[in-house]
């Protein structure tokens, strides 16, 4: 599996999330400024609630733009290959039972997942327990997660 294909798949997923967030923000803004949202009495809070929702949706758009921007930069300047796990690494982890999972160590958007050719790849960021445990590990090294789960780094791209 090619790391650039994985990055491109995440970029496509983040583009869709941004489009969805933008649509929701415009709808919320429209509801907040609509005449129907005007208070009919001092207890009517529809307009206030709509404005809170519009603000939250705008924040969601800003977050989605920041995530997408971080990965767009990788399309122009791909992360360099390293001998140890670092931001930009595509890693393969193996558990004691022999099952494997692939993860991309990224700067933002942790928890996202894409599937390419039937193989799932999870996006992991540094603040996560897995991200913290992975940084600096080399192929063959074992990492221990909270709860005692042990994983061995068996592949690094």
Image: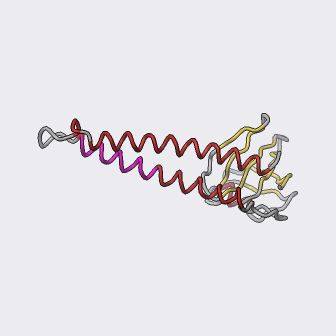
Residue at 50% across, 40% down: 20
In this rendering, position of residue 93 left or right of residue 16: right
* Colour pattern of the rendering: secondary structure
Say which of 24 and 128 sits in front. 24
Q: Outermost residue toward the left?
A: 41
Residue at 82% across, 64% down: 82
Look at the image and say whether residue 102 sits in the magenta stretch: no
Name the quarter where the N terminus is drawn: top right
Q: How many dots with numbers?
A: 0
Name the quarter where the C terminus is drawn: bottom right
Q: Position of residue 26 (x, y in %)?
A: 39, 43
Q: Position of residue 11 (x, y in %)?
A: 65, 48
Q: Is residue 132 above or below residue 32?
A: below
Look at the image and say whether residue 53 sits in the magenta stretch: yes
Residue at 85% across, 64% down: 83
Q: Position of residue 80 (x, y in %)?
A: 79, 64
In the image, the segment drawn in magenta is 47-60
Quarter-of-image position of residue 66:
bottom right
Residue at 59% across, 53% down: 68
Q: Position of residue 105 (x, y in %)?
A: 71, 56
Taken as a whole, is the magenta stretch helix, strand or loop?
helix
């Amino acid at each position: 599996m090619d790391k650039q294909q994985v990055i491109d798949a995440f970029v496509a997923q983040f583009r869709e999330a941004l489009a969805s967030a933008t649509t929701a923000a415009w709808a919320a803004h429209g509801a907040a400024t609509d005449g129907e949202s005007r208070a009919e009495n001092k207890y009517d809070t529809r307009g206030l609630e709509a404005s809170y929702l519009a603000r939250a949706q705008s924040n969601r758009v800003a977050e989605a733009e920041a995530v997408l921007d971080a990965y767009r930069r990788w399309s122009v300047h791909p992360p360099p290959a390293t001998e140890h796990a670092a931001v930009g690494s595509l890693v393969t982890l193996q558990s004691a039972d022999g099952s494997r999972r692939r993860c991309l160590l990224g700067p933002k958007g942790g928890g996202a997942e894409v599937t390419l050719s039937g193989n799932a790849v999870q996006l992991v960021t540094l603040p996560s327990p897995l991200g913290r445990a992975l940084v600096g590990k080399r192929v063959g090294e074992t990492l221990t997660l909270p709860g005692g789960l042990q994983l061995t780094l068996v592949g690094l791209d």
